[in-house]
Amino acid sequence: MMKTHPEYQYLSLLKEILGKGVRKVDRGTGDASYSLFGKQIRFNLAKGFPLLTTKKVYWKGVLHELYWFMSGQTNIRYLVDNDVHIWDDYPYKIFKLKSKILNPKSKTNSKFKIPITKEEFIEKIKTDNKFAKKWGELPRIYGEMWRRWPCNLREEKLQGKPTRRTIDQLAWAINEIVEDPACHNAIVTSWNPEYLYTMARYRDTSFFPICHNMYQLNVNDGKLSLQLYQRSADLFLGVPFNIASYALLCMIIAKVVGYQPGDFIHTFGDVHIYEIHLNQVKEQLKRKPLPFPKVSFNHDFKTVDDFKPEYVILENYQSHPSIKASLSVTGGYYGKHKNIFNVE
């Protein structure tokens, strides 16, 4: 196959980082990565769905994670119940951290040992509703920011209690391109400084590092395109997932608004390969891409709220075998929290 296959954009970026990437070390975990800044790849969705083929991408995880975001959910219980475990690590990390803060000198916190294993933690999420409600929650991440952005302004009192106004950014952005196809403002962002890093007060911090932080919808020539800006991108492990997820989101929105899918454009800030993934990357680069699959829908949904994962049909996905690798749980909350820019 000639090197016009769109997957070569991704493979070329892997090669470029191997050859030119600058080594960096995460201050929280000590994990090293090789990094470049300011890259971009583009996929024409009319020419196949960009589910990478040089290693098998976990399609079930893509479907359920995107639905989790789109439906505004923030608790991993939905994912665990559907046997999708791509988000297990961060709630478990937060559980260990907060449990030690709550009871720093004891080996137990209530009836739970500190630390319990990740497998025990996930089993608790699955079987114990009270535990899942407390420890499975990842507030202020993508689903909440997309569908219920929290405002400081409060609405009038309901039943004697003030209610906090929220903004459904996704619904708003879709409505903008319906009412004004020439608009330049159909943007959804997940980056809220109030909850991130040392900008946040400790009690407000999300603990989670928002990585794919902003996307924009645009209509040209009867086609709807989506551009993602990802400030931090794990090119080997996370980016294949992100490509498929946001390409599918573009197709879903295009169907809702009545346009053909255009391009998915993936713009990177810091794009990197972790040192622990170098052998896996070299293995992947030995492989040649296969034809991209196609995605279609078996149900005529009218809004994003009507969408369900089972409405998606993936056809003719061929790939090389999967390549296993460990997730580096970096970023977000770091060490002893200090409010550099805020006074409590």
Image (spheres, rainbow, N blue to C red):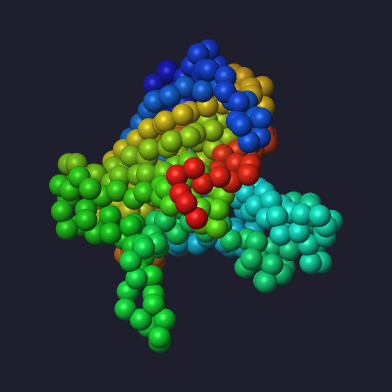
Q: Residue furthest front?
A: 343
Q: Position of residue 296 (x, y in %)?
A: 40, 51
Seen as rendered, the residue at the extreme bottom is: 159
Is any atom of residue 69 visible in this view? Answer: no
Horizontally, residue 115 falls left or right of residue 24, namely right
Q: Is residue 261 shown above or below 287?
A: below
**Residue 229 at x, y percent in the picture:** 38, 38
Which residue lies at the image location 42% right of the left edge and 18% below the top edge?
3
Q: Quick one: 153 or 132, which is closer to the camera?
A: 153
Image side of residue 52 versus residue 163, left or right: right
Q: Is residue 224 above or below residue 102?
A: above
Nearest the camera: 312 or 126?
126
> Which residue is depicted at the point 69% across and 63% down?
125
Q: Quadrant of residue 279?
A: top right
Image height of 22 relative to 136, above or below: above
Identity of the residue furthest to the top in this view: 19
Kindly identify the residue that appears in the image at 63 percent across and 36 percent down: 28
Nearest the eye: 98 or 186: 98
Q: Is residue 187 visible?
A: yes
- Residue drawn at the location 65% of the way across and 52% of the way down: 94
Left or right: where 77 falls relative to 169:
right
**x, y (%) of residue 141?**
49, 53
Left of 178 or right of it: where is 147? Answer: right
User: Where is residue 259 shown, x and y percent of the image?
Assistant: 24, 50
332 shown above or below 21? below
Quadrant hosting residue 124: bottom right
Which residue, as the protein is rendered here, is positioned at the far right? 107
When asked about the image quadrant of residue 300, the answer is: bottom left
